[in-house]
Amino acid sequence: MNEAEKIESVVRAVIRDILGVSQHRVDAFTHKTGLFGSLPELDSMAVANLLTELEDRLGIIIDDDEVDGDMLEDFGGLIHFCQRKVKG
Amino acid sequence: MITPYSCASGQEYILRYGEKNPAQIIIIQPFFEEHNRLKQVIVSIMRGLNAAGIGTALPDLPGTGESLIPVSTVTFDAWRAALSAAAAAVRPQNGPLLAMSFRSGALIDDAAGADALWRCAPETGPRVVRDLLRTRLTGGAKAMTNSDGMVDLAGYKLQQSLLDSISAAVPATTHPTRIARLKTDAAPADVQLEGSPVWRRSEPGDDPILCDAIIADVLAWVKTCAAS
């Protein structure tokens, strides 16, 4: 597994663990799968938990200014955001 | 059993399992939403430890859990003082009192005056406040302090001074401490546990894998504490 695949698998695991989305459902996510506004489990409280858990697992810090619609719009956007943060 | 204890704001209650056991552990729960999310897991751990001969005590601090005190009146020092009072009420006559804290509970666990501390995924104060503030990111509400010095945050009405105190707090380093974190957590720890971060789950519940991992580590830790 390369670095990009590792990050994608961490993001999938966080969505499963934090939002309670089943492994079966999260395995079926594509980069176009909608998140904020599309995934009912992802309310504003859950966004806070999701971001903080991603920080803990990836060893990154996410500034609140960086949190916008693009980043959480779909699964692909969130993965690309995390990959950029891990690279620094 | 449930026993009362007295603190400055009145009477609060302690849930106890195995209160006649010589070794007693007082458990400090996290604040705010994580308190609710972890309740079931903590009680499962208490039952498991009782089955292994370890007594545990879970106090509700003023403004938390079943307390009748509104959280809007609570101060950080009141939490610390109440924890001291609860610890004094459960301290065994002829055995050690140990303390386990979960998450933000680590910010006050030293106030229990326990002989040693076990911490599950301890948080610093700034991170606790940041988590609360983050719920506003996508919630739309921007107003912070109201004119009465109160803050509406993540569904809680809190004194600004409470948030300020939490912001300035970090887990104390004055006691022998064992730090446990999940295997998935990148931060340093003495032991890495199997299980999921129940405290961040939208729909919390039990996590038998996490409970078993915690019980096993705490039983080993209690033996180490008894030997030292």
Image (cartoon, coloured by chain):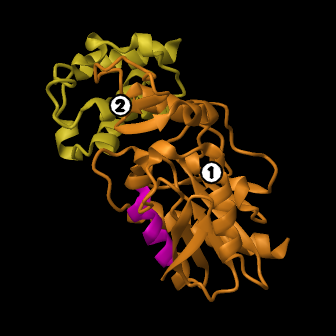
Residue B179 x %, y %: 66, 51
Q: Specify the segment rendered in magenta.
A: B38-48
**Helix, strand, or loop for circle 2?**
helix
Residue ID at (52%, 21%) = A61
- The numbered disc on residue B20 is none
Q: Name the residue under label 1.
A: B78
- The residue type indicated by label 1 comes to Ala
Q: In which quarter of the image is the C terminus of chain B?
A: bottom right
Question: Magenta stretch containing residue B115, yes or no?
Answer: no
Judged left or right of residue B149, residue A11 is: left
Q: Where is residue A73 in the image (x, y as percent from the top left)?
A: 22, 17
| Distance from Cα at disc 1 to Cα at disc 2 | 39 Å
* Picture quadrant where residue B88 is located: bottom right
The orange chain is B
Of B162 and A34, the residue lying toward us: B162
For the residue pair B21 and B190, the one nearer the viewer reads as B21
Chain A shown in which color?
Answer: yellow
> Is the Cβ of the residue at disc 1 closer than 8 Å to that at disc 2?
no
Query: Visible in this render: residue B39?
Result: yes
